[in-house]
Image (spheres, rainbow, N blue to C red):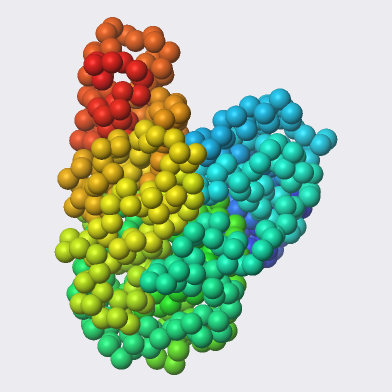
Amino acid sequence: MDLHIVGGEPTEAERAAVDELLGAPESGWDGGEREADRDGRSARGGHAARGRRDLLLPALHAVQDRIGWISRGALNHICRRLTVPPAEAWGVLTFYHLFATEPRPPVVAHVCDDIACRARGAEGLCHRLEQTLGPAGASLAGGRSTWVRSPCLGQCERAPAVMVVRAGEVPSAEVLAPVADTAEIAAALAGHPRGEPTGSRLEAVRRSVPQAGSLGLQLLARAGTVDPESLDAYRAAGGYRALARAFELGPAGVVAEVIAAKLVGRGGAAFPTGRKWEAVAKANVHPRYLIVNADESEPGTFKDRVLLEEDPFAILEAMAIAAFATGCERGFIYLRGEYPLAHERLSRAIAAARAAGLLGADVAGAGFAFDLEIRRGAGAYICGEETALFNSIEGKRGEPRSKPPFPTQAGLFGKPTVVNNVETLANVPGILLAGGAAWAGIGTEGSSGTKLFCVSGHVEKPGLYELPFGATLGELIELAGGVAAGRALKAVLLGGAAGAFVGPEALGVPLTFEGARAAGATLGSGVVLVYDETADLADALVRIAEFFRHESCGQCVPCRVGTMRQLELLERLRHGRQLGSVGEELALLRELGQAMRDASICGLGQTASSAIESAMARLDPFQLGGSA
């Protein structure tokens, strides 16, 4: 039976894009020309063909990169090549917002209108684009280009931001940030690149890392001072000494040092890293997998992007150490699809490390094998959840799995898997060189080490800052130059869209896991989004609700329905169209939040109301008086 999506055959360009990735088809059974003598009496493929389903996402990217959108014919060809049921492939394709399923020009400007860019004028920029270029999605330049609104692009320190993607035989992507006016976007759409910023490399990096070049930095020590594309420069700056130390300690010794350091995950969950490594190291199953979660999609977060762009070899070294300690043979970097520069620099770093024998069958001559590859996401916040990430790599919809079993037992492809955030791994070389106990002495008893904070919004010097745990919120904002233009502080969003709002009274809160909890907030992924007295917090809350409604995977009812009802309720409050009294609406909001916390499968639904409820309780964003 020939099952396919109705919509025609693939074009030669679409076939070429897929076949360049997967290799030439071997028979009519996997997308080639049918020959009766060869294909008429027996089928080919079977388990071997189905075992390549994890290439579904790369194949979709291949077509999108070449053509600019994915036709039904192209999808049919991908399904034949990978033996994936078309209905399942369609479910995967439509799961990601960066993939287009209808004809679209090859050049697209993705204009961020999420909370960090919104605080710096993105909504006004979009309105001006509508006036000068036409509505979002309108065909421009004879069908050659268009612009669309986009969720967060992870360029929050340089807001407002735009990503211009160009499809073709040599696809490219360019990030414009900050964008001064619509003419800059129009020029990029017309094929006139912005060009490199003027000044020294250190000056350029300081636009994102104001501390670059300062003494005492740990994770950001090489940012702006060491060429991120040179393995020799990285080694000259002390790179790969930690891997040599790992070989001296042995796998168990490395795990012991990480446990002694009290390192916990920096992606938001704060799970002890050493315990995770220990569980996988003790597993009696092979192969084992190591995954770097670089899909930071929390609005306001950009720390992992900066690390990958400015110090990619440090992440590769940390991965090699983690693989050695846990017995992982293969690794993946699941990279956010909106990070073209990080993808470019990581790809070059991997090639250089492999050529130098630091990846492959015999890493650094130590007798252990480990290699890795990059898998690009395609715009789905939920894939930052570790089990949803597994499904995405495996070529399925990025929906979270129920736990147990936990990833250390049955993760990627059903095998024991270590998943670490980029910032988490970036700490590992320093731990081995300093010693776990000494490293644990930095920070506080409950929060060891240093932490990266993504400061954006209404501050004089937005950017990525590194501080030891224990500095206060006020000290961090002061380090970032204080509230811009001397205005008064209105609120701070801590932890991102899944975090919590606090008011000026929280400036003395210590930035530690325990300090944030005591203040009824969370550090989350390190977001510190500052709002001054002019900010429209009601608009920000509605945008947060829109974000969660858009990003819900839809798998469970509490989240799928709850995020929609939450958005509708906030829209009613914003426009003064309450159903019943304000008090009844607020009670319903709290009930919705409780239902999502209690019954959602994963953290997205469980935290979808956190920031909104905190703002309603502390800040009266809709000017409801005592009713809030």
**Residue ranking furthest to the top:** 580
Q: In the image, residue 273 lies at what x, y percent?
A: 26, 66
Q: In the image, residue 553 lies at what x, y percent?
A: 40, 39
Q: In the image, residue 316 lies at what x, y percent?
A: 46, 74
**Residue ranking furthest to the right:** 142
Q: Residue 550: in sight, yes or no?
A: yes
Residue 183 as seen in the image, left or right of residue 579: right
In the displayed structure, would residue 467 be above or below residue 561?
Answer: below
State the count of labels. 0
Quarter of the C terminus within the rendering: top left
**Residue ranking furthest to the front:** 486
Q: Nearer the viewer, residue 595 or 147?
A: 147
Residue 403 as seen in the image, left or right of residue 166: left
In the displayed structure, would residue 495 be above or below residue 236?
Answer: above
In the displayed structure, would residue 42 be above or below residue 230?
Answer: above
Instruction: Examine the image and state in which quarter residue 531 appears.
Output: top left
Residue found at x 40% / y 86% = 241
Q: In the image, residue 234 lies at what x, y percent?
A: 51, 80
Residue found at x 44% / y 50% = 481
Quarter of the N terminus within the rendering: top right
Residue found at x 26% / y 74% = 439
Q: Nearer the viewer, residue 87 or 136?
A: 136
